[in-house]
Image (spheres, rainbow, N blue to C red):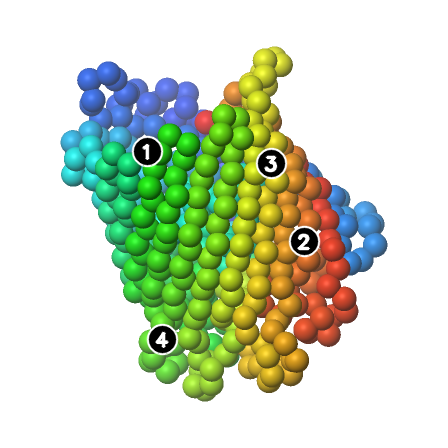
């Protein structure tokens, strides 16, 4: 009941704001004065899933995907604000996505302080579709953490440096009340969380990203190093990730290649080395391999049209492949189990084919999501980016498909 009341209050607030109240306090003008914009989005989801089980009445759904509130205070020469809070009725959770204070030292150098995007890989997204690419599901695409980031832009080069003390604050999980801590699964982007027999959280993360920019896009590299803190052992261990990436455009054609590798030193509460950790988002945790490499390639083609309210169609295919590098021999998991394998954990494959329809403030994604050992494309939710179906004795790793339509109104 409290959640419903909060939703109604926020909805009424946004209606009043967009009816003229707050917007009249500070309007943007051509003289560089401060301006305030309050907006948001409402999104709906239609889906038909064909996973390991037979298609039945529960295989199709029409859900209220999310609604969100955005506040941007632009203050040239002073301190600005960028804030976004999201609500996900389907998962019974809500959380902050981003929220930073911004200061421009000059036209080429900017600082963001608070919950801001981690500068790693292709920005802002490494994908064109509603599903993102596989790096998102291991915390390496559109990740947001709490710290400080400095971006410097020269004529042909962008350099980002960031330090994050900890992940972003959490919201509730499985409909429970939030204590607004930092170690739970109620969040937008995936982070290591304390679960199973491993009381782990992310701490002290450093990021450096550089990209050479030219008329046809950019090419760059990223390095990330941080720590995993085990509260039960009062012990810090290291984790790191590296990536090379590009974002190229040739007329209407876009190409997004990326290759990354990550590794974590992780120990459970008994001091035993483990080969999986729990990561969580949207209130749901699952086990992720502590070492893997991921290759992705996205291709898009954009066409402007004049079909009533429809102004653009973008067709795309985003492919991801994840090769887990742990699991050979006897493997100890974060959940406390052991596996005896002849080889590493099974690989994960994701491919999204679809198109985006732009019609004024409405953006609609039509996606055919396909996956093998993809944690969201299976009846055994969460299986794939650590041990696969066959590794866990759940049967063959099947080729699963979900047709998904996401309709979003952004204001």
The disc, 3 or 4, on the residue closer to the chain's N-terminal end is 4
Relative to 288, residue 123 above or below: above
- Mark seen at residue 316: 3
Label 4 crowd (10 A; few <14 / some 14-19 / many >=20): some
Alpha carbons under labels 3 and 1: distance apart: 30 Å
Disc 2: which residue: 371
Quadrant location of residue 199?
A: bottom left
Label 3 crowd (10 A; few <14 / some 14-19 / many >=20): many
Q: Is residue 39 left or right of residue 62?
A: left
The disc, 2 or 3, on the residue closer to the chain's N-terminal end is 3
Alpha carbons under labels 1 and 4: distance apart: 37 Å
- Dot 1 falls on a residue whose secondary structure is strand
The picture places residue 405, in percent across and down from the top left corner, at 66, 36
Disc 1: which residue: 72
The disc, 1 or 4, on the residue closer to the chain's N-terminal end is 1
Kindly indicate whether the residue at mark 4 contacts the one at mark 2 (C-beta within 8 angstroms): no
């Amino acid at each position: 009941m409290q959640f419903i009341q909060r939703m109604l209050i926020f909805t009424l607030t946004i209606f009043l704001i967009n009816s003229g109240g707050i917007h009249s306090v500070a309007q943007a003008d051509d003289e560089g004065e401060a301006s305030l914009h309050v907006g948001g989005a409402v999104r709906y989801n239609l889906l038909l899933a064909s996973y390991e089980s037979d298609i039945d009445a529960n295989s199709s759904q029409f859900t209220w995907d999310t609604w969100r509130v955005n506040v941007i205070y632009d203050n040239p020469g002073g301190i600005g604000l960028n804030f976004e809070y999201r609500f996900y009725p389907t998962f019974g959770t809500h959380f902050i996505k981003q929220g930073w204070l911004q200061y421009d030292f000059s036209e080429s150098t900017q600082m963001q302080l608070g919950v801001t995007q981690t500068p790693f890989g292709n920005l802002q997204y490494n994908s064109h579709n509603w599903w993102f690419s596989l790096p998102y599901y291991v915390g390496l695409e559109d990740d947001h953490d709490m710290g400080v980031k400095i971006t410097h832009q020269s004529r042909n080069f962008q350099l980002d440096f960031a330090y994050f003390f900890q992940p972003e604050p959490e919201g509730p999980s499985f409909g429970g009340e939030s204590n607004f801590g930092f170690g739970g699964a109620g969040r937008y982007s995936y982070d290591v969380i304390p679960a199973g027999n491993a009381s782990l959280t992310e701490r002290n993360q450093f990021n450096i990203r550089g990209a050479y920019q030219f008329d046809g896009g950019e090419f760059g590299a990223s390095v990330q190093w941080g720590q995993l803190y085990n509260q039960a052992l009062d012990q810090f261990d290291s984790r790191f990730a590296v990536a090379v990436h590009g974002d190229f455009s040739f007329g209407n054609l876009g190409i997004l290649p990326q290759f990354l590798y990550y590794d974590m030193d992780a120990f459970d509460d008994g001091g035993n080395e483990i080969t999986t950790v729990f990561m969580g988002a949207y209130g749901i945790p699952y086990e992720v391999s502590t070492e893997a490499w991921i290759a992705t390639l996205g291709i898009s083609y954009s066409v402007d049209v004049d079909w009533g309210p429809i102004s653009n169609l973008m067709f795309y295919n985003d492919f991801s492949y994840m090769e887990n590098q742990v699991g050979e021999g006897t493997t100890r998991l974060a959940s406390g189990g052991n596996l005896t394998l002849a080889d590493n954990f099974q690989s994960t494959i994701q491919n999204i084919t679809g198109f985006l329809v732009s019609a004024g403030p409405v953006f609609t994604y039509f996606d055919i999501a396909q996956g093998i050992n993809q944690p969201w494309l299976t009846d055994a939710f969460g299986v794939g980016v650590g041990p696969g179906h066959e590794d866990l004795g759940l049967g063959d790793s099947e080729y699963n498909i979900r047709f998904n339509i996401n309709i979003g109104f952004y204001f």
